[in-house]
Amino acid sequence: MAAALSARIAHTSFRLPSIDHILLIELAYAIIVAGVCLRIIHDTRNTAKTLAYLLLVIFVPLAGMAVYFTVGINYRKRKLYDHKLSDDEHLRRRMEERIIAVSRTLVEERAEVAPARGLVRLLLRDGRSGLTGDNAVRLLINGEEKFPALLQALEEAQHHIHMEYYIIERGVIAGRIRDVLMRKARAGVQVRLIHDDYGSRSIRGKWLRELRTSGAEVFPFNRVRLVPFANRLNYRNHRKLVVVDGCRAFVGGINISDRYINDGNSDGLYWRDTHLMIEGSAARRLQHLFLADWNFCAGQQVEPAPALFPPPDPAAHGGESVQVAASGPDSPAPMIMLSLVRAITMAREEVLITTPYFIPGEAILEALRVAALGGVRVRILVPERSDSRLVDAAAHSYFNEMLEAGVEIHLYQRGFIHAKTLLVDGHVAIVGTANMDQRSFELNFEVNAVVYSAKLGAQLRAQFLSDLAYAEPIDPARWEARPLFKQLPERLARLASPLL
């Protein structure tokens, strides 16, 4: 038996691929890699990002191609947002003439705006965001201040509630907000909610069904069918935006989640964040932004009716000057990044930046270096440790250049600082949803409020100094003297920074 089995094995023919077959496989593989590289070169506008994807595909071919086709395809080129773009233009045309006229008048009349006229004109010309001058702006620190103000505004809604959030997470605060929305919808208030389908994946199912049953309209942004295999995770709606009755709005870094309330009942991590409540004509611009997003998500054509854009009442609000900077994969230009660069370059005395993720890209990196070398005091506050080690490593790789130019960097240690703010010379304040990284500048839908106000500037500066009490400044000499085994991984992580 054993002899017969051995004889059969000996006579078994194992066919190996011939040399010709191997050459054909190698040729096909080379053609595929070359084709992917050509597509990267054609589709990717950012040079650093192009090189990063090319290196990834060439040196880690299969994994590199998987990464590119998962998160790297430029959907702007793929015409994904054509319908949204046309809706944006349709809404803008009805408002543009009046926006330009009012903005020019305010630039000339407002003393606090005059030093920043270059920034105003940039947003007006390329972002088509008019300057408004009849706003009351309230600074909201952390969820402890944001959520009571939001709940009160929702309770006072008479005609409509428009909301869009990147993260809505099941919990106490999300439940309270949903209860108000359901009660208002049953009372006849028009409730429209956009939730990012990836960031808000925890509310799928019953949570949303009950909200829809009450009469609220709810749509996901850029629906994700299978979350583990989603191929558009980089093209998300990162906005946190609420508009109530067309005259009161909320914008900033705080999502709907219990983690933003530091009451000891969550995971114990202190969460520092910043939000704004704006009452006045700037809410109309945020309304326009919401409707463009809504028409894209819902496939509807909601028109800018008078009830959605009520006439401004300066006596009922205030006199703060506000513009809105918005951008995303549907934008002709990365307007948020450009507005940050313009704000930094016009600084004469001081720049204060708070951001959870610092991967600035060359334009902002050079703007900060030039400002610091020119005598402007530049201070940057970032978390000592964020929620991504790779992002932290990439961020650290930029610190040497910043420190050498005289930029002061502080590492926040109390918890996680998630605020996204920039203050220039105490009177130009930018608060919103955009982090200082490439994901916010090019890949996600973001919105910032630009407020020309010494009052808000003083409040933000006081908060910045208060946060510094919980931060450790980086000593330039000690940072530069760190051992190679710490610096080398950061340099490697920087190679991936255009993709983060």
Image: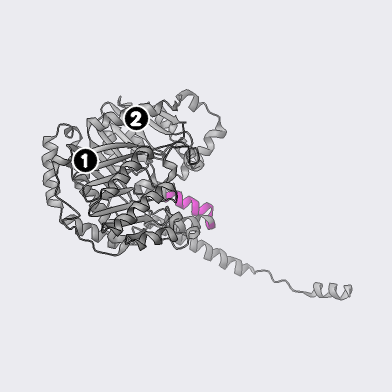
Residue drawn where x is 27% and y is 64% of the image: 300
157 is within the stretch colored magenta: no
Q: Residues within 10 Å of mark 1 (few under 14, many from 20)?
A: many
In the picture of the structure, the residue carrying the numbered disc 2 is 463
Q: Amino acid at mark 2?
A: Gln
Per the picture, the main secondary structure of the magenta-coloured stretch is: helix
Residue drawn where x is 49% and y is 60% of the image: 229
Q: Secondary structure at mark 1?
A: strand
Q: Is residue 241 above or below residue 299?
A: above
Percent x, y for residue 226? 47, 62
52 is within the stretch colored magenta: yes
Task: Tell me: 186 left or right of 65.
Answer: left
Percent x, y for residue 109? 11, 35
Residue drawn where x is 18% and y is 53% of the image: 309
Q: Is residue 299 above or below residue 111?
A: below
Q: Give the magenta-colored segment's residue range.
A: 50-62
Residue drawn where x is 30% and y is 59% of the image: 186
